[in-house]
Image (spheres, rainbow, N blue to C red):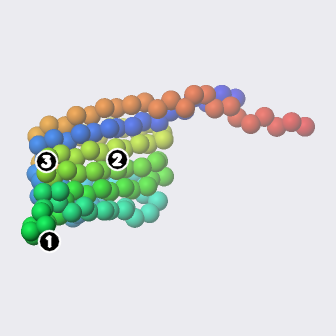
């Protein structure tokens, strides 16, 4: 028996974002929580986060300065990732789901959650080809 299978991937650039939200772990956790809830995603663990020091800080700069954040959430569907660049007011997101699913209102929701002025979305169908079911031999 042959079963066609495919997944979907969204590669997203959010531009003109609020730099404060891009450097705020609480704001990014809220973004992930909204996406998990609204897209009915299934996390298989807690998200991982890493905050970078500010690339604008100098040796004399404020030690409390923070930079962008990278976050990753493993899903039973695959993964959700983000990398933010507060110094450029931008964020890059990637959502990969191994099975087809409904889309998300990326421009509207990223405007609300990150203050994005422009959102570019590339939607990619990931074809796996036809999967052959194993044939049992007597």
In the image, residue 61 above or below residue 70? below
Q: Is residue 119 left or right of residue 42?
A: left
Q: Are marks 3 and 2 in contact (CB under 8 Å)?
A: no
* C-alpha gap between disc 3 and disc 2: 25 Å
Q: Give the foreground label among 3 and 2.
A: 3
Q: Residue furthest right?
A: 138
Residue 111 visible (yes or no) = no
Circle 1 residue: 63
Q: Which callout, 1 or 2, points to the residue nearer the camera?
A: 1
| Callout 2: SS | loop
How far separated are the C-alphas under marks 1 and 2?
38 Å
Query: If you read the primary sequence from the N terminus, does the residue marked by circle 3 or circle 1 appear first?
Result: 1
Q: Residue furthest bottom?
A: 63
The residue that disc 2 covers is 39
Q: Nearer the viewer, mark 3 or mark 1?
A: 1
| Residue 135 percent location from the top left of the image | 78, 34
Give the Cα separation between the discs numbered 3 and 1.
21 Å
Please indicate whether residue 133 sits to the left or right of residue 73 in the image.
right
Q: In which image quadrant can residue 101 be found?
A: top left
Q: Is residue 13 depicted above or below 23 in this figure?
A: above
Please name the residue shown 41% across and 42% down the image.
96
**Mark 3 highlights which residue?**
89
Q: Residues within 10 Å of mark 2 (few under 14, many from 20)?
A: few
* Secondary structure under the numbered disc 1 in the rendered image: loop
The residue sitting at 26% across, 44% down in the picture is 92
């Amino acid at each position: 028996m042959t079963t066609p299978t495919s997944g979907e991937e969204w590669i997203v650039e959010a531009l003109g974002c609020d730099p404060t939200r891009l450097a705020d772990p609480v704001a990014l956790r809220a973004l992930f929580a909204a996406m998990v809830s609204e897209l009915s995603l299934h996390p298989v663990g807690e998200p991982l986060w890493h905050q970078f020091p500010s690339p604008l800080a100098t040796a004399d700069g404020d030690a409390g300065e923070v930079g962008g954040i990278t976050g990753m959430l493993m899903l039973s569907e695959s993964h959700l990732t983000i990398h933010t660049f507060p110094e450029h007011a931008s964020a890059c997101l990637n959502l990969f789901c191994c099975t087809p699913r409904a889309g998300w209102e990326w421009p509207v929701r990223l405007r609300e959650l990150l203050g994005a002025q422009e959102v570019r979305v590339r939607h990619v169908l990931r074809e796996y080809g036809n999967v052959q079911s194993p044939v049992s031999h007597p």
